[in-house]
Amino acid sequence: MPGATLNKQMTQHYMSLPQADDQIQAMYVWIDGTGEYLRCKTRTVNFVPQKAEELPIWNYDGSSTYQAEGSNSDMFLKPVALFNDPFRRGNNKLVLCDTYKYNNLPADSNYRVECKEVMTKATDQHPWFGIEQEYTLLDVDGHPLGWPKLGYPGPQGPYYCAVGSDKQYGRDILECHYRACLFAGIKIAGTNAEVMPSQWEFQIGPCEGIEAGDHLWMARFILHRVAEDFGVVVTFNPKPMPGNWNGAGAHCNYSTIEMREEGGLKAINKAIEKLSRRHEEHIKAYDPKNGEDNKRRLTGLHETASIDDFSAGVANRGASIRIPRQVASDGFGYLEDRRPASNCDPYRVTSMIVKTTVLE
């Protein structure tokens, strides 16, 4: 565990050195060609940026990120969202970037451009999102953190939202990530322990439009970076352990202004009816492998609906779409799409939902 065994006190000695006001470290973060993993690198700028657009467009080697050939490898990074840096602190920044090819067209894994267009068209509907990001902590050997190396923990049941050293593994990472996100300016709404031991969840939102994807991607980056300091691996694998164990999703809570107003349940049911007609298209957009990853998770067991069938119900966690009981009681609110996999691209998920329910 090299990340955990390095001398952190020695690191702090250097990190506490004074930093000039006109020497700011800007860490550029982007999605690589897998559509699932993140990369980063840092440059110095001579001012404190207030908006992402103030920062210069940069480049990187796309042949090393599954995005270009070595004979034509340069790719462009365009800053699109700015956050405070919880690792270097001070005036230093984390910079979420769009990726572009040599010809200035979006990279194949850049779904943000299309999502931005969709959200702009739907501005008058004020689409809100809250995404429940589940993840699993692993030792560096790929085994779930805290699990017996030659066996399994006790059956699921006592782990969800539980406390105690015999029930929870890795809470320090959850707490450090939560505080780092708040410092960064990310709209993190909460956290909890999940059903499978060593599995956790954080929630992003409520966010309007493109902001949901921006904040979730940066929250994922910060989570990976926090876990790195502890020598622990984060996986967003939708089914990290085969057998009688819960998978991991990224449930997407969604509403328009019409759904949130008095009598909005009618609009919610209308949206669900539209979603039912495009189930297969949504499944293909809800994980990086066009539904193949989700097949292992959406089995109809472990609080999921079958990947082959669309369903909806009040308070039903075994349905594709859940209407929360409070929403059914109030007559307005939001719906929860439980189909997105934990490793989904939130830009694809949110734009697909808006296209289906608002634009088409």
Image (cartoon, rainbow, N blue to C red):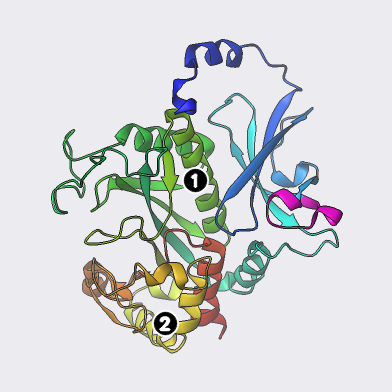
Which three-letter amino acid code belongs to the residue tagged 1? Answer: Ala
- Residue 266 horizontal/vertical position (percent): 34, 83
Q: Circle 2 is placed at which residue position?
A: 271
Q: Estimate the x, y position of residue 73 in percent, counting from the top left.
A: 81, 53
Residue toward you, 281 or 16: 281
Residue at (23, 66) in percent of width and height:
302
Taking the image as drawn, is residue 256 in sight? no
> What residue is shown at x 59% (from left), y 59% (from top)?
35
Of the numbered discs in the image, which one, if any, rests on residue 219?
A: 1
178 sits to left or right of 43? left
* Nearer mark to the viewer, of 2 and 1: 1
Q: Position of residue 244 (x, y in %)?
A: 21, 61
Q: Is residue 97 magenta?
A: no
Q: CA distance from mark 2 to mark 1?
A: 29 Å
Q: Is residue 142 left or right of residue 51?
A: left
Classify mark 1: residues with Cα within 10 Å, few (<14), some (14-19) or many (20+): many
Quadrant of res 304: bottom left
Residue 241 locus on image (x, y percent): 31, 56
Q: Secondary structure at mark 1?
A: helix
The vertical placement of 33 against 202, above or below, is below
Camera-nearest residue between 332 and 113: 113
In this picture, residue 263 sits left or right of residue 208: left
Q: Which residues are magenta?
A: 63-76
Q: Quadrant of the N terminus?
A: top left
Task: Find residue 237 and name its label.
Answer: none
| Above or below: residue 56 compared with residue 109 | above
Q: Secondary structure at mark 2?
A: helix
Decide: few, some or many residues near mark 2? Use Cα within 10 Å; few <14, some 14-19, many ≥20.
Answer: many
* Residue 326 in sight in this render: yes
The answer to which of marks 2 and 1 sits earlier in the sequence is 1
Instruction: Name the residue at the front extreme.
Output: 150
User: Which amino acid type corresponds to the residue marked 2 in the rendered image?
Assistant: Ala
